[in-house]
Amino acid sequence: MSIHASIGARYSTTLVKDSVVVPIELQPTLAPVVQLSLRDAFPGPWTGDATLDVSHAGLDRRESGSSVSAGSVTNVALLLGLRRRLGHGVAAHLGIGGLIYSASEPGVFNHGSGGPMPLVSLSGAYAPPIAASHGLELSAQYDLHRFITPALRSVGFNRARPVHRLAIALSARVLGR
Amino acid sequence: MNARIALTIAVLTAGCSDIITPSRTPRYLADAGGDTFHWPADRIPVRYFVDARGALPRLVRTGLSAWEDQFLYGEFRGEVVADSNLADVIVRWQDSVPADVPPDTAGALGACDGVTTYVVDSTKTMTGPEHVSLRVRLGYTFPQIAACFRRVVTHELGHSLGILSHSPATTDLMYGTPAIERPTERDRNTAQVVYHTPATIFPPRR
């Protein structure tokens, strides 16, 4: 069993597309991300893990060619995953879990976030042989969830919007082997 | 497993083209003789100076909160400032200060009134802060007056943020003689549309 810590940056697609006289988009800014994973090796090439993922982004409201801050948002996700070594220091990972939003301003979170949003994550990691002894890895992570809040429902949004996120992170083993 | 992953992603993304954008109807016209106003993004939060006497500070904070709740994207926020020289909006009692008592739940329309005024120059730029004046009307009990101001203060704040006219619907907060304390769906839709409509009246220079 081992514990791994990661830091990186995350891009997210638009949370809300609206039209009030003009088109409006609400999108998180590029965000720092921190992850803490507990990994346990299974027989063969498989590893199971539980990951706590925290990121904090500004929220931009975009309309008529301008961008205005609409506060900020903190995401906390908990993922359970399976990881498979593919050889040559490359590994693939699949995770599922839940994501919650906590915002600095009410706005679309005026009536809360609506609870955890299901999240599915796919990632690939590369561990250079020279850094293998420290468990250093570079990973590219993609995840997907659907975003809607009670405030959006209350004004008439009928469906959640798929939100795609992409993160690049550097991780290291901090405990265990 | 690959098929399951594909299915999961398909379920999560399904219907992305079917999201309906709310129409923001019903609503009413919020202009004044064809002119529209809203506080621009670089003037948010709007600064309110409030007469500290009686219940007014609490009523203004409650009213601002009620209006802020109507917006999804941080279009409007207000803050109370201590210096009237820094204010965008000045809220005052016009003459007497009513007693701060629990409101009458039976309700009595017309126990108070308010007016929101501003002056614009030839470029349709406000020459100074907006003024909200609140007045007690004679012949009513203090609880009736207290209930009235809970409605009228929030109503006048609606004018101050950019709803320059009255709703034709008697059930709306922005009806001329409001009978409720919070914005309705029509008030909300109207306020949201105002904040995404190009303004023709501009705030005072700082």
Image (cartoon, coloured by chain):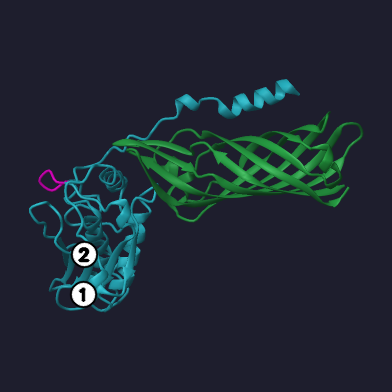
In this rendered view, identify the residue nearer to me: B138 or A47. A47
Q: Amino acid at mark 1?
A: Thr
Quadrant of residue B59 within the rendered picture: bottom left
Question: Where is the C terminus of chain B found, in terms of image quarters?
Answer: bottom left
Quadrant of residue A82 within the rendered picture: top right
In this rendered view, identify the residue nearer to me: A12 or B116. A12
Most extreme residue toward the front is A130
Residue drawn at (28%, 44%) of the image: B186
Which shade of the palette goes to chain A? green
Residue denoted by label 2: B108
Q: Amino acid at mark 2?
A: Ala
- Horizontally, residue B54 falls left or right of residue A107, namely left
Q: Chain of mark 1?
A: B
How would you classify the magenta stretch by its main secondary structure?
loop
Say few, some or many: other residues with alpha carbon within 10 Å of mark 2 (under 14 / 14 to 19 / 20 or more): some
State which region is magenta: B31-35
- Horizontally, residue A2 falls left or right of residue A69, namely right
- Horizontally, residue B125 falls left or right of residue B68, namely left
Q: Chain of mark 2?
A: B
In this rendered view, identify the residue nearer to me: A77 or A169. A169
Residue denoted by label 1: B141
Residue drawn at (79%, 38%) of the image: A127
Distance of label 2 from label 1 (alpha carbons) = 9 Å
Image position, residue A19 (x, y; %):
35, 35
